[in-house]
Image: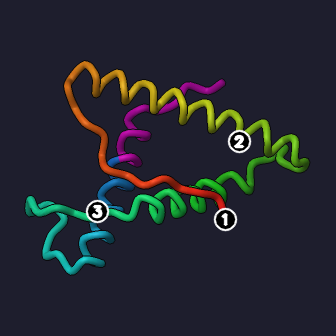
Amino acid sequence: MTELNQDYIDALHRAMVEAICKVSAARQQSASSDKGDTLYIGTAEVCQALTNLLTEFLEGVPGLDRPGDVRQLSDTVARKIRRGIAEIRRHRDATGGAPLPSIVIREN
């Protein structure tokens, strides 16, 4: 497997978080997303937007012709999400941080 460019990943991550904050601030008619006020972000909507974006990027991946191929890829993504959540929780435990308030997303 090709080595991933962590600097690029970090830059994409920052850009996505910034875009989510800017759109959320505009929707609640806040002058700025960084002025210190509480910023309400629609967790379910953000998750749906990220799922849509991931789907659009993955749709063109070669070799996803059968449902089993898609299932294998989605299992890999799910594993990475589980590992990421566990890593974040370990970091929060070590630093005394608390998770952001979120809601449960249910499939329609």
Kind of residue at disc 3: Cys
Q: Is residue 90 magenta?
A: no
Q: Residue at x 20, y 23 (%)?
A: 95
**Would residue 65 appear left or right of 15 to someone viewing this image?**
right
Instruction: Give the magenta range.
Output: 1-13
Kind of residue at disc 1: Asn
Q: Residue at x 25, y 77 (%)?
A: 28
Disc 2 vs disc 1: which is toward the camera? 1
Q: Which residue is mark 1?
A: 108
Q: CA–CA distance between discs 1 and 3?
A: 26 Å
Q: Position of residue 29 (x, y in %)?
A: 21, 80
Number of numbered discs present?
A: 3
Give the camera-side residue of 60 and 52: 52
Q: Which residue is mark 2?
A: 74
Q: Residues within 10 Å of mark 1 (few under 14, many from 20)?
A: few
- The numbered dot on residue 40 is none
- The numbered dot on residue 21 is 3
Give the camera-side residue of 24 and 5: 24
Kind of residue at disc 2: Ser
Q: Position of residue 26 (x, y in %)?
A: 26, 77
Find numbered disc 2 in the image and state the secondary structure of the residue it sits on. Answer: helix
